[in-house]
Amino acid sequence: MTTTTTTRFVSVVGGAVLGLTAFSASAATEMPPLPEVKGEKVEADGNFKIKFSIGTTESGAQYRGLEYFEKIVEQRSDGNIQVELFPGAQLGDDRQATSALQSGTLEMTMPSTSPLVNMFPEFAVFDLPFLFPQPEMADAVLDGEIGQQMLEDASSQGLVAIGWGENGYRQLTNSQHPVEEPADLDGLKIRTMENDLHLDIWRTLGANPTPMSFAELFTALEQGVVDGQENPWITIESSKFNEVQDYATETNHVYTPFITLVSARFWDRLPEDYQQLLRDAATEMGDYQRHVSRTLNDQIKQDLKDSGMQITELTPEQVKVFQDKLEPVYEDWRDQIGGELIDDIRAQVEQAQE
Ligand code: EAX
């Protein structure tokens, strides 16, 4: 490990790593320590088991968040609720896991909002390009009234929505050549999430997009079924997309939230005090998981470079070319998403910018 990486790593997790002596080359993905569990034990009747499934792998920030959730829930329920984690889409991708919650065969999952837009059309607002210039602006919206209302709205159709997390800012990768401007996308086959607005974005930019579930993505990239995809740095690394993608562009084109969902069938069997415990744990998981994701973001970008990926960092002028080209997408989607919601969020973002 180089000195710079060591310094960066130590600065990320502070004194907690000083006791460790050896680092492997992948030490950069070592996670910050899990925080202590705060709060009293919750007394209630019954024993419960939660299977919690996610699409991203064990080495991502999302999984680290789940480990904290597990620790909080198991400790504070005094072991009466046991949480078992299933990363890497082994129990299904975002959509499959969500429908397993609806049928009651799985208790929890934490998908990106984007593949759920067919169930909850207002989620499409988070697919609008360049909506949140800073992650804290997404926090303000998600943790404020709008996000709260959305959790309530999404607590229907056999689901209970209890919190937000972050997948993060999405970056473009591909196997063909560096991309610096929309013209470089001409003809590139880009996998998108199963989401019409994302398809529209990549079509508008001149690429040839195709929707596909996350679970199929690595193989599709490896076999050249698609040339590229887009996901946050941490997801690119934890899914090893860099092994089959030589080029990346730091586009930051969309900020994707994760939403924490519980099966309503399971929820209805829980004593109220345990329901509240899950809500509290989901909030703490969300805060911690955002923290992990943000602390590791730059470091992981550097790791990807070190591993040989050619990363194009765009100047503000270059970003503006993408933004301008995508401005029509706002008009096209305005009525479908709800103009008022878009205006509210944009107003909140502007306020936060001042
Ligand atoms: O569970 O499909 C994707 O690109 C997402 O990152 C997925 O929600 C991860």
Image: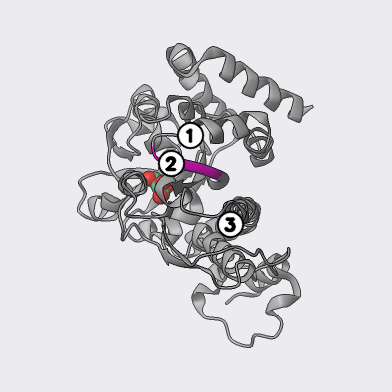
Magenta extent: 158-162
How far apart in space, not on screen, are marks 2 and 3 (Cα)? 17 Å
Residue sitting at 57 percent across and 28 percent down?
Answer: 131
Q: Contact, CB < 8 Å: mark 3 with mark 1?
A: no
Task: Tell me the crowding category of disc 1: few under 14, some 14 to 19, or many 20 or more residues within 10 angstroms, Cα based.
Answer: many
Identify which residue, 65 or 153, lies in the foreground: 153
Q: Contact, CB < 8 Å: mark 1 with mark 2?
A: yes
Identify which residue, 280 or 331, lies in the foreground: 280
Question: Mark 2 or 3, which is nearer the eye?
Answer: 3
Quarter of the rendering occupied by the N terminus: bottom right
Q: At label 3, which amino acid type do we have?
A: Tyr
Q: At label 1, which amino acid type do we have?
A: Ala
Please name the residue that numbered disc 1 is placed on: 154
SS of the residue under disc 1: loop
SS of the residue under disc 3: helix
Q: Contact, CB < 8 Å: mark 2 with mark 3?
A: no
Q: At label 2, which amino acid type do we have?
A: Leu
How far apart in space, not on screen, are marks 3 and 1 (Cα)? 20 Å
Q: How many marks?
A: 3
Residue 159: mark: 2
First-in-chain label (2 vs 3): 2
Q: Where does the image place residue 200, in percent across and percent down from the top left?
A: 36, 24
Residue 274: mark: 3
Q: Magenta stretch containing residue 161, yes or no?
A: yes
Give above or below for 52 relative to 96.
Answer: below
